[in-house]
Image (cartoon, rainbow, N blue to C red):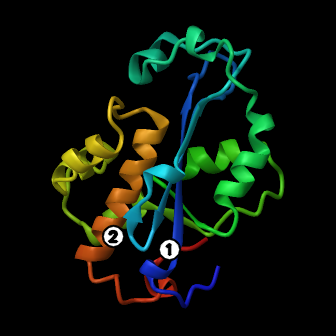
């Protein structure tokens, strides 16, 4: 990914996972994935992808209360690893976006040497370019930027803690920051906090 490009010249792909929650002595596993795409700083709903993910791990009551996903949603869902061709085609060659990217990076380790990136963490960017907020949750950032109506129109029938809804929300936050923090005419390498 050439970091000399301007934001409107880049294809961004936002990814979000919802998880089963952690059981005592266990690890977490993804139960839903959402991917949304932004070209020329416009979110492209036609390029979105969302799927539940089968897991043998039960969804905890606490996790289900957050995202609403139950075992019934996962009964005929594909295995995460079977989605490699889909993920590869949607994420390769794109700048990957996530809000609090640690979870997304951790779950993508299921595909060693996947090569996706570079990454943009909208949580990190919001803290840097939108200082002074008491709450940097995705929901609060969307409300603060007055993007709720656009988000709900783009993802009808969905809500926060749905993987596709959160992916689109991440892109809208990124676009807002680019347009309102003077980043639109600055090359990526000047403002992206890259690892």
Label 2 secondary element:
helix
Q: Residue at x 36, y 89 (%)?
A: 185
Q: CA distance from mark 1 to mark 2?
A: 10 Å
Q: Residue furthest right?
A: 112
Left or right of 49: which side holds 78?
Answer: right
Q: Is residue 22 left or right of residue 114?
A: left
Q: As drawn, which residue projects farthest toward the front? A: 46
Quarter of the view holding residue 180: bottom left
* Whether residue 110 is situated above or below residue 174 in the rendered picture: above
Pick whichever of labels 1 and 2 is earlier in the sequence.
2
Q: Secondary structure at mark 1?
A: loop
Crowd around label 2: few <14 · some 14–19 · many ≥20 (10 Å): few
Residue 124 placement, left or right of 115? left
- Pointers 1 and 2 in contact (C-beta within 8 Å): yes
Image location of residue 117, percent across then percent down: 65, 66
Seen from the viewer's position, the closer of residues 69 and 88 is 88
> Around disc 1, counting alpha carbons within 10 Å, would you say few (fewer than 14), some (14 to 19), or many (20 or more)?
some
- Residue in the foreground of this view, choosing between 138 and 86: 86
| Mark 1 lies on residue | 193
Look at the picture and state if 3 lies above or below 94: below
Check disc 2 and report the residue beneath it: 128
């Amino acid at each position: 990914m050439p970091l000399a490009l301007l934001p409107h010249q880049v294809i961004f792909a936002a990814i979000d996972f919802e998880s089963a929650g952690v059981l005592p002595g266990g690890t977490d596993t993804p139960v839903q994935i959402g991917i949304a795409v932004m070209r020329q700083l416009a979110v492209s709903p036609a390029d979105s992808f969302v799927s539940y993910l089968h897991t043998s791990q039960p969804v905890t009551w606490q996790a289900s209360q957050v995202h609403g996903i139950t075992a019934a949603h996962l009964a005929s869902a594909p295995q995460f690893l079977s989605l490699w061709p889909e993920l590869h085609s949607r994420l390769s060659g794109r700048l990957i976006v996530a809000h609090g990217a640690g979870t997304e990076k951790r779950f993508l380790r299921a595909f060693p040497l996947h090569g996706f990136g570079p990454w943009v963490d909208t949580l990190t960017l919001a803290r840097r370019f939108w200082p002074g907020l008491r709450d940097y949750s995705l929901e609060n950032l969307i409300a603060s930027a007055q993007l709720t109506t656009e988000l709900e129109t783009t993802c009808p029938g969905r809500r926060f803690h749905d993987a596709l809804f959160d992916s689109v929300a991440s892109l809208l936050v990124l676009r807002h920051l680019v347009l309102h923090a003077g980043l639109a005419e600055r090359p990526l390498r000047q403002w992206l906090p890259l690892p």
